[in-house]
Amino acid sequence: VQLVESGGGLVQAGGSLRLSCAASGRTLSSYAVGWFRQAPGKEREFVARISWSGGTISYADSVKGRFTIDRDNIKNTVTLQMNVLKSEDTAIYYCATDPGSSSQYDYWGQGTQVTVVT
């Protein structure tokens, strides 16, 4: 199983980026998917999660109203639309799959760097 994140980059504060998580060796439609991030010197933190059906979504308070998680089970991808980016959003962003409903993530991608400059 391989998860690959893409879409990261350098953006001005207030701008937008759209991250994508693609899977090989696993059909994402059967799993919940979470996005996490880790900033330099900080612990990894939860960003957003979407259930296998897309019917249940949750966000960290820090991104609520600015980020949107979505999934396309035909394309086998999960996206994270990030708007009104702030410098504190700078981090490596990871996606991960959860085979159950207990937020026990089993496979992780390598991450994509997001850098927000002012």
Image (cartoon, rainbow, N blue to C red):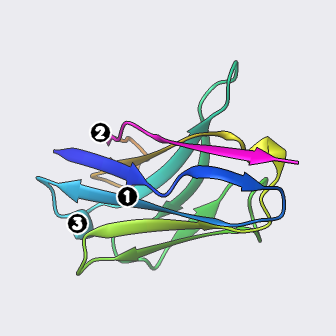
Query: Which residue does the image show at 25% across and 63% down from the upper left?
Result: 28
The reply to whether callout 2 and callout 1 are in contact (CB within 8 Å) is: no
Which of disc 2 and disc 3 is earlier in sequence?
A: 3
Report whether 116 appears left or right of 58: right
Q: Main secondary structure of the magenta part?
A: strand
Q: Residues within 10 Å of mark 2 (few under 14, many from 20)?
A: few
Report whether 43 appears left or right of 100: right
Q: In x, y percent, where is residue 103? A: 44, 46
Query: Which residue does the image show at 38% across and 55% down from the upper left?
Result: 101
Which of disc 1 and disc 2 is earlier in sequence?
A: 1
Q: Residues within 10 Å of mark 1 (few under 14, many from 20)?
A: many
Q: In x, y percent, where is residue 81? A: 59, 69
Q: Which residues are magenta?
A: 106-118
Say above or below: 83 vs 112: below
The amino acid pointed to by label 2 is Asp
Residue denoted by label 1: 21
Query: Which residue does the image show at 40% across and 74% down from the upper left?
Result: 71
Residue denoted by label 2: 106
Q: CA distance from mark 2 to mark 1?
A: 15 Å
Say above or below: 12 vs 50: above
Residue denoted by label 3: 30
* Callout 1: SS: strand
Which of disc 1 and disc 3 is earlier in sequence?
A: 1
The amino acid pointed to by label 1 is Cys
Judging depth in this view, the residue of 18 and 67 nearest the camera is 18
Which image quarter holds the N terminus?
Answer: top left
